[in-house]
Image (cartoon, helix red, strand yellow):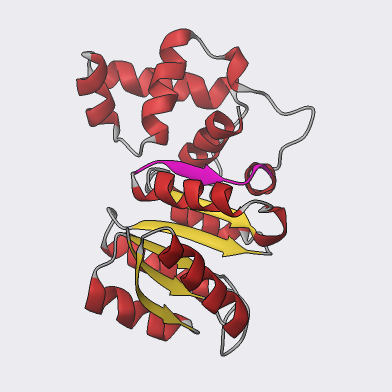
Amino acid sequence: MRVVVAEDTAILRAGLVQLLEEEGHTVLAAVPDAELLRAAVLDHRPDLVVSDIRMPPTHTDEGLRAVVELRAADPALAVLIFSQYVETQYATRLLAGGSAGVGYLLKERVLDAQDFIDALERVAAGGTALDPEVVNQLMGAGPSRRTVDELSPREREVLALMAEGRSNAAIAAALVVTERAVEKHVANIFLKLGLPVSSADHRRVLAVLRHLGA
């Protein structure tokens, strides 16, 4: 993999670079802030971005906002957020374009270096790596929440394709059905998962998170 790393803590940044290079990957740039991250991605066109959330100058959500912008400009860019915080607003926006090639891991919950490398390689290959705690917070999980077990086999197929970031038209083509049929399945998924219309939430993203959480 060709990787750009964004991490403001110098020791951790150096550790990530060393780990990646020991595994045979190429670190194109290792930067301490979001502005340098944007510049590095534009200059190097990496296969994968690994970024913290809180970086200078305000140490709030600069890293995640930068990743959302980069991903919006290039949906094929694989990104993995590596942080000790769960930031729901921009994380939801990050997943709004599809979960393929997206990862979000919590630093204190990564206990094995090889597991971390496996997650990076999975994301770079177009897969997903989301910490269960991230999924729980993003979808407000609780014992009373409805699950994908309530969906029909066809609805689960539609939801799985939604999780790949496919549009209704692409899902219809993959399942050899009409787009109108897909729209009905999607509406049923939202209904069964208890996801009412809301200006604050992306129902498609929340449905995908239920799929990933299952």
Residue 200 visible here: no
Q: Quadrant of residue 35?
A: bottom left
Q: Residue furthest top?
A: 153
At which x and y percent is residue 69?
Answer: 37, 68
Q: Quadrant of residue 164?
A: top left
Quarter of the image with the N terminus in it: bottom left
Residue drawn 41% across the image and 66% down it: 21
At which x and y percent is residue 25?
Answer: 36, 61
At which x and y percent is residue 65?
Answer: 48, 70
At which x and y percent is residue 86?
Answer: 66, 59
Name the foreground residue: 120 vs 210. Answer: 120
Q: Which residues are magenta?
A: 126-132
Residue 131 visible here: yes
Name the foreground residue: 22 vs 77. Answer: 22
Residue drawn 54% across the image and 77% down it: 13
* Magenta residue check for 16: no
Residue drawn 30% across the image and 73% down it: 41
**40 shown above or below 83:** below
Residue drawn 46% across the image and 18% down it: 156
